């Protein structure tokens, strides 16, 4: 590549994690892998997603394969990035037009020179990560090609959004609470009974931990069900690796599999394991979207972090991936977080969790649910008090309000969540993990719950609902249980959409009937 003026890569600024400090550069010969994502060669055709055909669009839905190719990167973009890599002695490990990505490997010294940064070791006394400070630089010729550069910094990017029910003390022992199996919750939420998700694949994104086949066998045997088909997919060297601790990522993995598998037992459950970095996270999402063997129709994401902990380039890359998924007929469900209106940020300000704040993800908030038989007797916003857990929700600082939300959201920015479901660990989900029976809550459980419902809807409709936010807000509010009591800190529940529980929890049969009537 000819010499060129270098410019700042927009949205790439990074600062050290609070409490960490640089102790110097990492070894200059240390090998590092990165992923460069490229911009789509053409606009992503969300207006042609399958659900728009159901909603009466006159434009025919494109096939999944057509959209995959249309949303890819151009051959010219790939070539320019490959030439740039060669200039800095970087090896091209993978160049994929459809995934819009180029995977590179090189020494810390060469990568630092290529992107105008120093890769350093940051420590806080107990742990460390490889990181950088400031913005990345790229040749000006690549400004219309490169969307993001991920992997130079390998800090942990996200955390799981589950809460384990623990023995209560004092007055809380006098309070009655009840846990539920996912199948009981499916009955309370009136999931369509004639469908079980057959023919669908639910993708689960996991950033650590693993599952035991023996746990799944025990769990589903207790429910009187066959173990659903579960496949493990390795991404960026990560794989199914149980840690033996239910409080760690194993708890998340088991919760996701067991909830999705119980409410959509006819589905295949594909579990994508990746490193907990922004690069690993996005690579797992793209692996699921473009998996030609399993072909998921819905993706469930129970990991995330405050928008303020992400780079703008990473959030843009995720959002573009979710747009691609929606255009291909893949619904993306994402947990809205378990730390109330602050999302765990200690600045006394309101924050929302990403990736649920992407307008192309179905953001799933949390409730406290009480039921009797097959009926809900009470459902309120999940909020167990300061430090104890509460549903995430509020308004994005990054993404503007989408047109489908303007009728209910008068703010300038995307409101979170869109929908809700039981998340209070006091009325939580019965799971089996690392050989033990547990009760978990958190919005982590709501994402796979909705993913299972989507799988049933897809089966019933004979076509995937995909990106169905427009019809969800336009024609489905009456098919959801409106939550009007409670708060998550700064925000209160109200009639209609609110930044605690969105449009409400599902009445699955009403949702299906409404979609069929369209």
Image: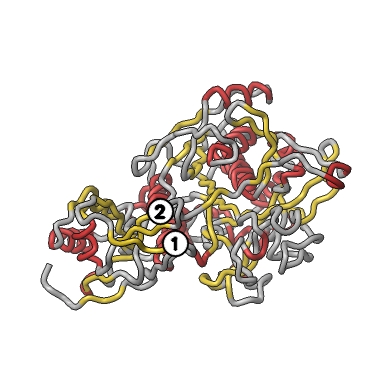
**Which residue is most to the left?**
2
Residue corresponding to mark 1: 20
Instruction: Find out whether the residues at labels 2 and 1 contact each other: C-beta distance under 8 Å.
Output: yes
Q: Position of residue 466 (x, y in %)?
A: 52, 51
Determine the secondary structure under disc 2.
strand
Q: Can you tell which quarter of the image residue 240 is in?
A: top left
State the residue in front, 311 or 285.
311
State the residue in front, 117 or 183.
117
Give the vertical position of 228 relative to 12 (above or below): above
Q: Position of residue 346 (x, y in %)?
A: 61, 66
Q: Is residue 317 visible?
A: yes
Mark 2 or mark 1: whose residue is earlier in sequence: 1
Position of the C terminus by quadrant: bottom right
Q: Can you tell which quarter of the image residue 497 is in?
A: bottom right
- Distance from the alpha carbon under mark 2 to that under mark 1: 8 Å
Which label number is shown at residue 2? none
Q: Position of residue 193 (x, y in %)?
A: 70, 35
**Is 67 on the left or on the right of 397, as rendered?**
left
Q: How is the image coloured?
A: secondary structure
Q: Residues within 10 Å of mark 2 (few under 14, many from 20)?
A: some
Q: Is residue 71 visible?
A: no
Q: Position of residue 92 (x, y in %)?
A: 20, 51
Residue corresponding to mark 2: 128
Question: Residue drawn at (56%, 51%), measured in percent from left and top?
Answer: 333
Question: Residue drawn at (70%, 37%), measured in percent from left and top?
Answer: 439
């Amino acid at each position: 590549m000819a010499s060129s003026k270098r410019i700042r890569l927009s949205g790439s600024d990074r600062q050290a994690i609070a409490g960490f400090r640089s102790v110097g550069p990492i070894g200059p010969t240390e090998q590092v892998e990165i992923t460069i994502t490229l911009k789509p060669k053409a606009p992503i055709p969300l207006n042609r997603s399958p659900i728009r055909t159901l909603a009466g669009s006159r434009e025919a839905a494109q096939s999944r394969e057509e959209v995959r190719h249309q949303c890819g990167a151009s051959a010219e973009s790939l070539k320019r990035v490959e030439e740039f890599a060669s200039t800095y002695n970087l090896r091209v490990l993978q160049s994929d037009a459809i995934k819009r990505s180029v995977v590179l490997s090189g020494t810390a010294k060469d990568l630092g020179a290529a992107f105008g940064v120093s890769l350093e070791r940051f420590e806080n006394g107990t742990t460390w990560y490889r990181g950088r400070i400031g913005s990345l630089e790229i040749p000006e010729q690549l400004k219309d090609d490169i969307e993001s550069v991920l992997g130079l910094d390998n800090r942990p990017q996200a955390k799981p959004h589950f809460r384990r029910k623990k023995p209560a003390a004092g007055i809380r022992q006098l309070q009655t609470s009840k846990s539920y199996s996912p199948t009981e919750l499916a009955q309370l939420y009136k999931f369509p009974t004639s469908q079980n998700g057959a023919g669908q694949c639910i993708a689960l994104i996991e950033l650590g931990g693993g599952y035991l086949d023996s746990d799944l066998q025990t769990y589903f045997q207790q429910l009187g069900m066959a173990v659903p088909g579960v496949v493990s997919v390795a991404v960026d060297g990560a794989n199914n690796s149980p840690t033996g601790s239910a409080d760690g990522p194993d708890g998340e993995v088991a919760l996701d599999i067991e909830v999705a598998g119980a409410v959509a037992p006819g589905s295949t459950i594909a579990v994508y394991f990746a490193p907990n970095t922004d690069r690993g996270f996005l690579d797992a999402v793209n692996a699921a979207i473009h998996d030609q063997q399993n072909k998921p129709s819905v993706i469930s994401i129970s990991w995330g972090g405050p928008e303020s902990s992400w780079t703008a380039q990473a959030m843009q890359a995720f959002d573009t991936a979710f747009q691609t998924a929606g255009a291909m007929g893949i619904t993306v469900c994402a947990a809205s977080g378990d730390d109330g209106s602050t999302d765990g940020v200690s600045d006394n300000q309101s924050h929302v969790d990403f990736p649920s704040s992407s307008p192309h993800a179905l953001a799933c908030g949390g409730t406290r649910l009480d039921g009797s038989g097959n009926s809900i007797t009470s459902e309120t916003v999940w909020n167990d008090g300061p430090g104890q857990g509460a549903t995430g929700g509020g308004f994005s600082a990054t993404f503007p309000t989408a047109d489908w939300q303007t009728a209910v959201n008068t703010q300038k920015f995307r409101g979170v969540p869109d929908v809700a479901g039981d998340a209070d660990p006091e009325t939580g989900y019965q799971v089996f993990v690392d050989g033990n029976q547990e009760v978990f809550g958190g919005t982590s459980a709501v994402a796979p719950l909705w993913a299972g419902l989507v799988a049933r809807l897809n089966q019933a409709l004979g076509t995937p609902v995909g990106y169905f936010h427009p019809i969800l807000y336009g024609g489905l509010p009456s098919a959801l249980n409106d939550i009007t009591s409670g708060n998550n800190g700064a925000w209160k529940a109200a009639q209609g959409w609110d930044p605690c529980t969105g449009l409400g929890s599902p009445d699955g049969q009403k949702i299906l009937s409404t979609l069929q009537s369209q």
